[in-house]
Image (tube, rainbow, N blue to C red):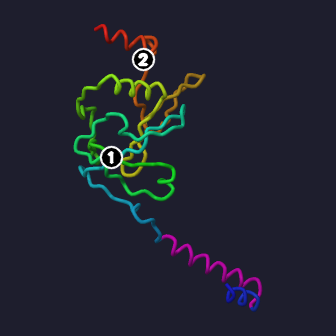
Amino acid sequence: HFHFFMAARRFGGRSAAACGAVLLLGLVATSSAFYLPGVAPHDYNPGEKMRVKVEALTSVKTQLPYEYYILPFCHDGVDLKAQDALNLGEVLRGSRIYETPYEFKMSNDQRCKILCRGKYDKEEVQAFALMIEEEYRVNFLLDNLPVAMPMFVESEGGETSKGYDLGYPVGFVDEKEGSGEKKKKDDKKK
């Protein structure tokens, strides 16, 4: 820094501006080669497997995040003790990132398919019902980017616009059938 100021003083204002421009260009050139460890870009080939990870269950209603596997979601073949390395901020925030058994391949369209089948006891069903009532969302990560769900909003003028919501709901309440409680009772009769 001292040498720059001495040169600027010695050669006047124009040379100082030129020295500053050269210094700035030098900094820009070195910054283009900078990347954070662990987040280097990955170019996928068609058909290459992509890892699907999951962060927390979150709700705008409660502001209380829960770990994904607090609910009995499918976890066949997943080591529930293994977590991705997190940075200090994520650890302090309470984030946990886990693997999932979901499989996606680059450039391969897939329709919905069954991942697993399970039987749930009364407490597990109540846990799902509570998460649905509290509007919890599942937050998946694909290639370390958040997965979003398309959402369509109709304006007063009748024009529809497309947006995206991060994650997807744990479940929905069937508004047409009445309250969720009524729907559950009707299902038990069948």
Q: Secondary structure at mark 1?
A: strand
Towards the viewer: 152 or 67 = 67
| Quadrant, the N terminus | bottom right
Q: x%, y% of residue 52?
A: 32, 46
Towards the viewer: 36 or 33 = 36
Question: Please, is residue 107 above or below residue 14 in the view?
Answer: above
| Residue where numbered disc 1 is placed | 52
Q: x%, y% of residue 26?
A: 56, 78
Specify the label residue 3 is tagged with.
Answer: none
Q: Main secondary structure of the magenta part?
A: helix
Magenta stretch containing residue 25, yes or no?
yes
| Quadrant, the C terminus | top left
Which tag, 2 or 1, sits closer to the chain's start? 1
Mark 2: amino acid: Asp
- Residue at 27 percent across and 40 percent down: it is 75
Question: Please, is residue 144 above or below residue 113 in the view?
Answer: below
- Residue at 29 percent across and 48 percent down: it is 106
Mark 1: amino acid: Val
Q: x%, y% of residue 13?
A: 76, 83
| Residue where numbered disc 2 is placed | 174
To which quarter of the image does residue 123 belong?
top left
Question: Please, is residue 83 above or below residue 38 in the view?
Answer: above
159 sits to left or right of 10: left
Question: Please, is residue 5 above or below residue 46 in the view?
Answer: below
Magenta stretch containing residue 121, yes or no?
no
Separation (CA) of disc 2 from disc 1:
29 Å
Q: Secondary structure at mark 2?
A: loop
Towards the viewer: 27 or 176 = 176
33 sits to left or right of 48: right
Q: x%, y% of residue 139?
A: 42, 41
Dots 2, 1 in contact, CB < 8 A: no
In magenta, the rendered stretch is 11-32
